[in-house]
Amino acid sequence: MTVLERARAVAATVVDPELPMLTLADLGVLRDVEVSALGGVVVSITPTYSGCPAMATMRDDLVRTLRSEGFADVEVKIALQPAWTTDWITPAGRTALADAGISPPGPAPRRDGPVLLSLGPVRRANRCPRCDSEDVELTSEFGSTACKALYRCRACLEPFDHVKEI
Amino acid sequence: MISDDLLGNDAHWAFGTDFEDPLAGVDTTVPDGVDPASLARYCLMLGDDALVLSQRLSEWCSRAPDLEEDIALANVALDLLGQARLLLARAAAADPSVVPALPDDSPVPAEDALAFFRSPAEFRNVTMAELPNGDFAEAITRLLLLSTCRLAEFESMAAHPDAVLAAVAAKGRKELAYHRDFAARWFVTLARGTAESRRRVLDALDGLWAFWPELDAPAGVEVVLDQVFAAADVSRPEVAPARGLGRECVHTEALTDLLAEMQSVARAHPRGLW
């Protein structure tokens, strides 16, 4: 394994501070890992939302993990472009979310034209992550963190989080 | 650059919570053909709109009609605070002369110096953002008008020659689409609800509409608003425009009060570390 491959493998083990069942790689937040000629590691991460309060924790976790694996010189950069989309959550990440009782996002809306106004009720082909029922209702488009909406299952009556599409 | 003593001594200024630099590693060189002072002024306009409205929305925390709307308004406030942070950091990087002078050894990052150490007469937000909070119908109506304009502004800003601003816009528009839809749905719900909820939303619209011309709505905004108004069975108010000069740093007393509260702790402890 080359130094670069090892650095990438180590960085890919770091988990998200708010969704610890998911690695930063599975969440699509880990954008790039590079190793300079002198052996310094440069990691690029992207915020999920502009106000994401977890960026510093992600950075510290990446630095600490890479250092503990022998990478002394670690730099973490912000990559603002392209903007994060839920489409970057990997299949493994989606499975991990569902296993933790969080409904994974559907396809993100296309954003290549003007953003159309949506006045009607939000419809998603969602299933309850606990009982798999399709009989679910939206409680609020805003939930416990910026990236989640709040749902309720009408079959098993449990509330659950849904990672909303952006 | 992450300093070597990050893990041993990561004390930072008590009022910042994230990366020391929200643009860490981002190339902030101002492109040819873009005037740095104009770019900074534009970033301050949009950054101050977001910061001030975020502060007003966060005043709703624990006071909204129900828990879901409380959380929703706090989420919107957090998104706007994040946009404000990026935009104020961009303004400072483009034209450092806009940042208030602090002692050389001050631990305050540039974007926080802009947020906490400017006087009201240095803020460029529109008047509508700073008006004191009214009832829930007023919060929804204000958010509808401001987020509709801001989304349209960000859609055109996504093609800005400054790559940093374009990136901030491409990210923010996804958030703003949720804000606008949230506000528009509640506006329609209130307008078509009870006589009391309709009265309140119409009163709110009448009160805010005087400040609409100051927003200098980008093309297409009025088409969207008319869609919402039609669904709500509401017509555009006929109200004489107020003299709104927020972009020229002329503000109401409400901004002075808002900033006095927002800035008081940072100004009392400008070297606070944790």
Image: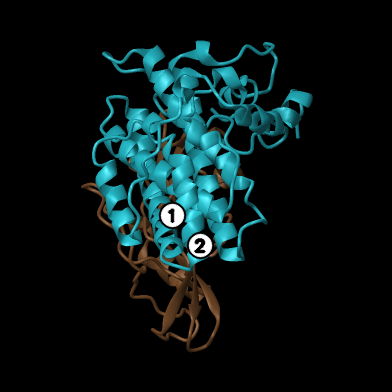
* Mark 2 residue type: Ser
Image coordinates of residue A11 in percent, x first then y, are: 49, 48
Query: Three-letter amino acid code at disc 1?
Result: Ala
- The quadrant of the rendering that contains the C terminus of chain B is top right
How far is disc 1 from disc 2 in space, using C-alphas? 15 Å
Q: Nearer the viewer, residue B67 or A145?
A: B67
Whichever of callouts 1 and 2 sits on the residue coming sooner in the sequence is 1
Could you tell whether B16 is left or right of B244 in the image? right
Chain letter for cyan?
A: B
Q: Which chain is brown?
A: A
Q: Vertically, is B9 above or below B68?
A: above
Question: Which residue is located at x 62 percent, y 19 percent?
Answer: B119
Q: Residue A65: x and y, percent?
A: 58, 47
Residue of label 2: B197
Q: Secondary structure at mark 1?
A: helix
- Name the residue tied to disc 1: B183
**Residue name at image x 61 percent, y 46 percent:** B58
Q: Is residue B144 above or below residue B1?
A: below
| Lateral position of residue A44 relative to residue A52, left or right | left
